[in-house]
Image: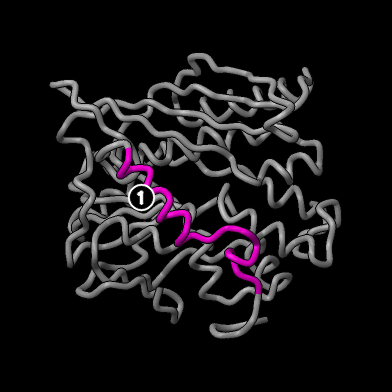
Amino acid sequence: MTEEGDDGLTYADAGVDIDASEAATAALVGAVGEVEGDYAGLVDLGDRYLALATDGVGTKLLVAEALDEYSTIGIDCVAMNANDLIAAGVTPVAFVDYLAVETPDDETAEAVGEGLAAGAARAEVALVGGETAVMPDVVRGLDLAGACAGLATAEEVFDGTARVGDVLVGLPSSGIHSNGLTLAREAATRDHDYKDPFPYDEDRTIGEVLLEPTRIYRDALEPLLAVETHAAAHLTGGGWTNLRRMGDHRYVVEEPFEPQPVFAFVREAGEVSAAEMHRTFNMGTGFVAALPEADAARVLEELQDTRVIGRVAEGEAVAIRGLEL
């Protein structure tokens, strides 16, 4: 097992350079004009905001393809979009999907649809249509993306900036969610196959564990809106560095949730350093909110699987498990 400075597998080695990705995103945003909000684009309608988020499932699709199991990726697609709205203090209300395929297949489409319906139910949004495109010259297999619309008043939208002295309230993840799969797949297939038994639970395969659907944090929205929540972060691409979206502070994470066994497996199989794991994955905690300490007890009372995991201090870093990110 490697530590910081060793030559273990990295996200960039696997094919995804986070810095390059962020630079490309900045270039795109610069070309199309300034967009309000870190997680969702906000349109001022006068008495409220219309918010829009768009995202896909990423290379988790390749695990689904290897197992010929597409019934859960629709949940991931809804989750990646709805969670971004929730992190902005916005109530998701409607979702639309876009399925691009190399070759039409009724059974696969039906399985994808089942997942979308399940995800929509968990997010409490309406599925208001979608599009299926057949593009054999562009797509190998299939690609799935979507967009989620939400509504919020000006008072509901989180201002997006944590304050020094805030506490960090965290909610656990359901596993690897739908990011970092390029690194996870590279590690998992070095000496294993997706259909091999998962070393930590031989009743499941490695592929089944990687396909565990992304948790949708719809249950956190009302409790967070009922108090003075300053900012929130959905821990997706970039892992724990997502906390920096809440402002230039030092985020001291003292009691994160324990990582599920899938993370130990990826780390061991790929000889991935602890720092790289935390820069890539949620490592057991999928959603974090910054709010005054006086409000934390009310949120914890309403959300049973929530706890205070840390605090916001002076500085510019994320301190977690002995690491400085």
Instruction: Relative to 3, say whether 242 is above or below.
Output: above
Instruction: Tell which of 238 and 118 is nearer to you.
Output: 238
User: Which coloring applies here?
Assistant: one colour
Whether residue 162 appears in this view of the structure is: yes
Q: Which residues are magenta?
A: 9-31
Seen from the viewer's position, the closer of residues 36 and 255 is 36
Which residue occupies 52% across, 14% down?
Answer: 129
16 drawn magenta: yes
Which of the 4 image quadrants contains residue 42?
A: top left
Image position of 73 (left or right of 233): right
Q: Quadrant of residue 115?
A: top right
Residue drawn where x is 20% and y is 74% of the image: 314
- Main SS category, magenta section: helix
* Residue 126 on the magenta segment: no
Image height of 124 relative to 79, above or below:
above
Which residue is depicted at the point 77% across and 55% down?
A: 206
Q: Residue placed at 64% from the left, 36% from the top?
A: 73
| Residue 60 pos. (x, y %) | 66, 45
Above-or-below relation of 72 to 50 = below
Residue that numbered label 1 is attached to = 26
139 relative to 119 in the view: left or right: right
Taking depth in this image into account, of 320 and 135 the one nearest to the observer is: 135
